[in-house]
Image: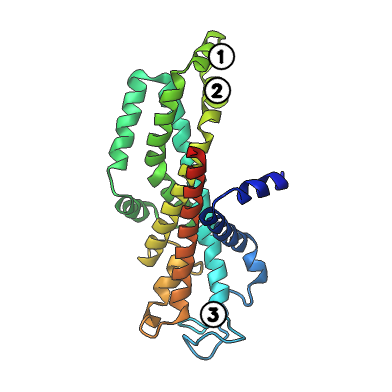
Amino acid sequence: MIRSLASRAAALPLSGRIGLALVLFWLVIAVFGPLIAPYPVGRFVDEEVFSPATSQFWLGSDYLGRDVLSRLIWGARYTVLLALGAAVLAVFTGTSIALFAAIRGGVVDEVISRTMDTLISIPSKIFSLVLVAAFGSSLSLLMLIAAFTYIPGNYRIARALAVNLVGMDFVSVARARGEGAIHIAWREVLPNMIHPLMADMGLRFVFIVLLLSGLSFLGLGVQPPHADLGSLVRENISGLPQGASAILSPAIAIATLTVGANLFIDALKGKGDS
């Protein structure tokens, strides 16, 4: 299996391999990084603030004299894992609703689709701000809010795929055999939607990373003592005039994560179209 995955990765264009490497790098940092972080995330280790990179502090220190590298590692953990969890939840929920609507059809499909159209017409950041103001911003709630915000977008894509597949002959044959709706949805229709849905989940992941980072920059996302990449940018904003690494490092981390994911997704789309 590992050899098969390696061969598929090698078949990607250069941009896709770069994107995959960046995504895997941040995923490994998110999962295992805290085990190798040089210092505890909240420890004050430098008498100077916004000190430059040294052999002791590879990325310098932040506005309180804490090690930037250690905080960046922990911040990446919250950003990547929260966004990944929200993306999986959004795609799973949106696809499940889409399969139900496509198979039932009629009034059920119309009501669900118009409801989703109403939700998707609300700008995602405004929608999220309203939900955060109403329900709070704990880690679990942030993941649920981010997922809920992007369910309608996934629903539209999944429903379009499902409606086309439901009208095909192999689904009619399954119905003629007496198969139920659940079997048709999960055994006949869903397997033929996997590749587009995986690409969509990658896009949702990028959108959610940017959404969570934006909320944290506004002070409405991950709250102290926790910090994600957006929080690190916000709390070190006073170091911007001197170009402190404490503010540049998390900004670059967000950029490399999102650009890497986009490069990988585009490579997968191109490979699927060829």
Q: Three-letter amino acid code at disc 1?
A: Glu
Residue 188: numbered disc = 2
**On the rendered structure, is 208 left or right of 33?**
left
The front one of 222 and 206 is: 206
**Of helix, strand and loop, which one carries label 2?**
helix
Answer yes or no: is residue 210 visible.
yes
Q: Are marks 2 and 3 in contact (CB under 8 Å)?
A: no
**Of helix, strand and loop, which one carries label 1?**
loop
First along the sequence among labels 1 and 2: 1
**Of helix, strand and loop, which one carries label 3?**
loop
Q: Are marks 1 and 3 in contact (CB under 8 Å)?
A: no
Residue 123, position as x, y percentages in the image: 29, 49
Residue 103, position as x, y percentages in the image: 44, 21
Measure how far apart labels 2 and 3 are at the Cα level.
52 Å
Measure how far apart labels 1 and 2 are at the Cα level.
10 Å
Coloring scheme of the render?
rainbow
* Number of the front mark, 1 or 2: 2
Say which quarter of the image contains residue 186. top right
Residue 138: numbered disc = none
Q: Are marks 1 and 2 in contact (CB under 8 Å)?
A: yes
Say which quarter of the image contains residue 179. top right
First along the sequence among labels 2 and 3: 3
Examine the rendered structure and indicate whether residue 5 appears above or below residue 253.
above
First along the sequence among labels 1 and 3: 3
The residue carrying mark 1 is 179
The front one of 190 and 150 is: 190
Q: Three-letter amino acid code at disc 2?
A: Glu
The residue carrying mark 3 is 59
* Number of the front mark, 1 or 3: 3
